[in-house]
Image (cartoon, rainbow, N blue to C red):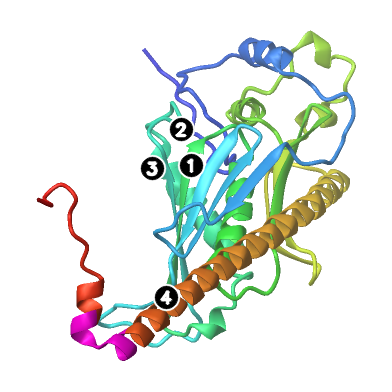
């Protein structure tokens, strides 16, 4: 018996996909009808929570929640390249490692492939951001732990790593922000969830909804248009650090999705700047508190030294010996 297996599209970065041997167009139609469809396009980010410096054991760390997508980024200080036969490189090397928590996804078979792909895409997005000319012949290791996956995984990882890099004190050219948008059957999904990305994956697997009854009033070229766009930008320089597309998009649709993602990136940029400003203020208060504690400690030690000079060593020791009330006769 011939069994057909679909090849997974790793470009759909955030989908949590259950393996299926075969999915008919009718299954895709039912799945599409179960998805909540947007009535209007509003280019705003999801509910977002970002926290810098969540770990005290490393110099740079950040935690981010983008809707139901949750992950953590860790940045270690640059370290020298250890290669016996490596030649001196003209720029620093960035290595990104992405790992899924055991409870983050149900599709365990494709996890190694997705981790490798996400790490490669994350490296390409962060290389234009970091001033790699400042640590020649050194490498910078960035690690991302994915705790929950509900779409927009790569763009969320880029945002979180950007915050962690600044927390670590790594020189960057600008703040980086990223977002995701996609289109399917004429519907534009801003910040698509894992279900929408799964639907795109099923479509690219060959299950286009060409024979559905709801598609009779739509032109064939409109039905065929489907795709996902991930855009990472640096607003100060008006540059794109990474712009990744998968699927089929018309030029005008591509430009429209690009404008949506740039608008979301601007909103995220204001949020990240506020988070970093609050982090600087928080760290300043901690430093002031530590300085005050050190000042009080120095004052106490100075008083002890003064007493020691005035009383002498033997008298000072005797004055500080207190008799235990429980052993006193």
Q: Are marks 3 and 1 in contact (CB under 8 Å)?
A: no
At x 30% / y 77%, what residue is drawn? Answer: 82
User: Does residue 193 sit above or below 316 in this rendering?
Assistant: above
Q: CA distance from mark 4 to mark 2?
A: 52 Å
Task: Tell me, yes or no, whether the two marked residues, 1 and 2, touch with CB atoms within 8 Å.
Answer: yes
Disc 1 from disc 2: Cα separation: 7 Å
Residue occupying the point 58% across, 29% down = 205
Q: Point out the tag, 3 or 1, that comes first from the N-terminus.
A: 3
For the N terminus, the image quarter is top left
> Looking at the image, is mark 3 or mark 1 nearer the viewer?
1
Query: In the rendering, which numbered label is found on residue 104?
Result: 2
| Residue 239: percent from left, percent from top | 76, 67
Q: Earlier in the sequence, mark 3 or mark 4?
A: 3
The image shows residue 281 at horizontal and vertical percentages of: 67, 63
Disc number at residue 146? Answer: 1
Secondary structure beneath disc 2?
loop
Give the Cα separation between the discs numbered 3 and 4: 58 Å
Residue 42 position, x and y percent, is 87, 36
The residue at 58%/44% (across/down) is 11
Foreground tag (4 vs 1): 4
Magenta segment main secondary structure:
helix
Q: At numbered mark 3, what does the secondary structure look like: helix, strand or loop?
A: helix
Q: Is residue 231 visible?
A: no
Distance between mark 3 and mark 1 Cα atoms = 13 Å
Check residue 300 in the rendering and tell me which mark sits there, or answer none.
4
Would residue 189 be visible to someone looking at this image?
yes
- In depth, the one of 280 and 66 nearer the eye is 280
């Amino acid at each position: 018996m011939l069994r057909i297996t679909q090849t997974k599209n790793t470009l759909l970065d955030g989908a949590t996909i259950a393996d299926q041997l075969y999915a008919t167009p009718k299954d895709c139609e039912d799945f599409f009808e179960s998805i909540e469809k947007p009535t209007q396009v509003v280019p705003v980010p999801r509910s977002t929570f970002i926290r810098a410096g969540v770990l005290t054991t490393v110099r740079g760390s950040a935690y981010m929640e983008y809707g139901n997508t949750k992950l953590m980024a860790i940045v270690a200080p640059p370290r020298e390249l250890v290669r016996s036969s490596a030649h001196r490189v003209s720029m620093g090397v960035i290595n990104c490692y992405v790992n899924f928590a055991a409870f983050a996804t149900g599709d365990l078979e494709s996890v190694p492939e997705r981790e490798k792909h996400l790490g490669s895409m994350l490296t390409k997005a962060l290389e234009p951001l970091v001033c790699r000319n400042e640590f020649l012949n050194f490498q910078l290791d960035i690690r991302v732990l994915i705790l929950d996956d509900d779409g927009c995984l790569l763009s969320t990882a880029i945002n979180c790593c950007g915050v962690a890099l600044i927390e670590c004190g790594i020189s960057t050219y600008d703040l980086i922000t990223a977002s995701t948008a996609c289109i399917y059957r004429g519907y534009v999904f801003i910040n698509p969830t894992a279900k929408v990305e799964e639907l795109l994956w099923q479509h690219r697997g060959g299950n286009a909804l060409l024979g559905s009854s709801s598609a009779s009033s739509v032109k064939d070229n409109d039905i065929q248009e489907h795709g996902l766009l991930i855009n990472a930008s640096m607003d100060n320089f008006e540059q794109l650090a990474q712009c990744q597309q998968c699927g089929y998009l018309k030029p005008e649709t591509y430009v429209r999705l690009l404008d949506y993602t740039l608008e979301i990136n601007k909103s995220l940029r204001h949020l990240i700047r506020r988070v970093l400003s609050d982090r600087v203020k928080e760290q300043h208060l901690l430093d002031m508190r530590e300085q005050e504690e050190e000042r009080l400690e120095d004052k106490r030690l100075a008083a002890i030294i003064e007493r020691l000079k005035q009383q002498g060593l033997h008298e000072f020791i005797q004055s500080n010996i207190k008799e235990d009330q429980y052993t006193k006769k």
